[in-house]
Amino acid sequence: MNNETDISKSQVLAIAIFNLAEQLQLQESELALVLDLSKAELSSIINQKELEPDTTAGKRAITLINIYQALFGLNGGDLSWMRQFINSPNKLLDQQIPRSLMQTEYGLSAVLRLLGRLQPH
């Protein structure tokens, strides 16, 4: 394969997470919190378009992608519904807002677990 045209896992992850953030209307400052990065670290990732999957930020990005996929699966990709879900207090999360919860590792896991329970089996 030609190295100039190969795309690495870190590039795929960075591109996916930036597209996801845009679709869910997450601000850069929120994305930095979700990924547990400083704004400078996130800026570096944005500029380099690379996010290593085996780092803490990479693992959290993968969890966020799993959340996005679960939301997508619940409603067929209706972005308006997906945004409403992450922006609204949720009874099953003790009236907490998923968008805020996702800014911690525990919150990311809690939102993902909830979405797993909501999936049709």
Image (cartoon, helix red, strand yellow):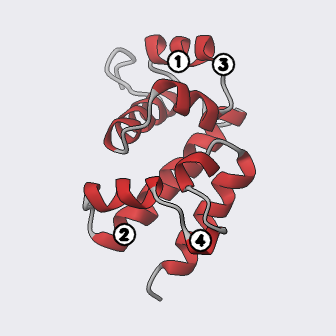
- Give the amino acid at mark 3: Ser
Mark 1 or 4, nearer chain start: 1
Residue bearing mark 4: 114
Residue 1: image location, x then y, percent: 36, 26
Which quarter of the figure has residue 44? top right
- Mark pair 2, 4: CA separation: 13 Å
Which quarter of the figure has residue 36? top right
Left/right of residue 14 with respect to residue 42 in the rendered view: left
Please give the label number shown on residue 38: 3
- Give the amino acid at mark 2: Gly
Residue bearing mark 1: 45
> How many other residues sit within 10 Å of disc 3, few (<14), some (14-19) or many (≥20)?
few
Residue bearing mark 2: 73
Mark 2 or 3, nearer chain start: 3
Residue 7: image location, x then y, percent: 39, 27
Mark 2 or 1, nearer chain start: 1
